[in-house]
Image: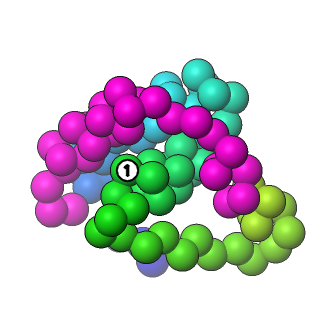
């Protein structure tokens, strides 16, 4: 089922995952929360993020992601790493 997230294809995304984890540790939040915050704030003029939630915990986690104050440098680091990922 999610073949893009297995094996060699997963390895291509490893640097981005590692960067999201690193920044998440800095703010004591999950990599997913960092990614959502970056998507909403760094790309606010081009992307409208509509996160899904199957339960209350996921909805709360999504909401908490907007309480993080990523620095411009944090967001630019994520952006640089993400640009190195080509078609997966």
Residue 33 among those drawn in magenta: no
Q: In the visual, does 13 lie left or right of 70?
A: left
Q: Main secondary structure of the magenta part?
A: helix
For this orientation, the residue located farthest to the right is 56
Numbered marks: total: 1
Residue drawn at 75 percent across, 64 percent down: 58
Q: Residue 4 versus residue 41: which sits nearer the camera?
A: 41
Way the structure is coloured: rainbow
Q: Residues within 10 Å of mark 1 (few under 14, many from 20)?
A: some
Residue drawn at 70 percent across, 74 percent down: 53
Extent of the magenta region: 62-88
- Residue 41 image position (x, y, % from top left): 45, 52
- Quadrant in the picture for residue 87: bottom left
For this orientation, the residue located farthest to the front is 45
Q: Is residue 78 visible?
A: yes
Residue 68 among those drawn in magenta: yes
Residue drawn at 32 percent across, 65 percent down: 45
Q: In the visual, does 70 lie left or right of 14?
A: right
Residue under numbered circle 1 = 42
- Residue 70 image position (x, y, % from top left): 51, 35
Q: Is residue 59 above or below residue 18?
A: below
Residue drawn at 58 percent across, 22 percent down: 26
């Amino acid at each position: 089922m999610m073949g893009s997230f297995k094996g060699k294809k997963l390895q291509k995304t490893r640097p981005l995952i590692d960067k999201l984890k690193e920044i998440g540790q800095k703010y004591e939040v999950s990599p997913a929360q960092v990614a959502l915050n970056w998507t909403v704030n760094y790309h606010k003029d081009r992307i409208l993020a509509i996160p899904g939630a199957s339960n209350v915990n996921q909805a709360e986690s999504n909401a908490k992601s907007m309480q993080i104050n990523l620095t411009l440098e944090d967001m630019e680091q994520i952006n640089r790493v993400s640009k190195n990922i080509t078609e997966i």
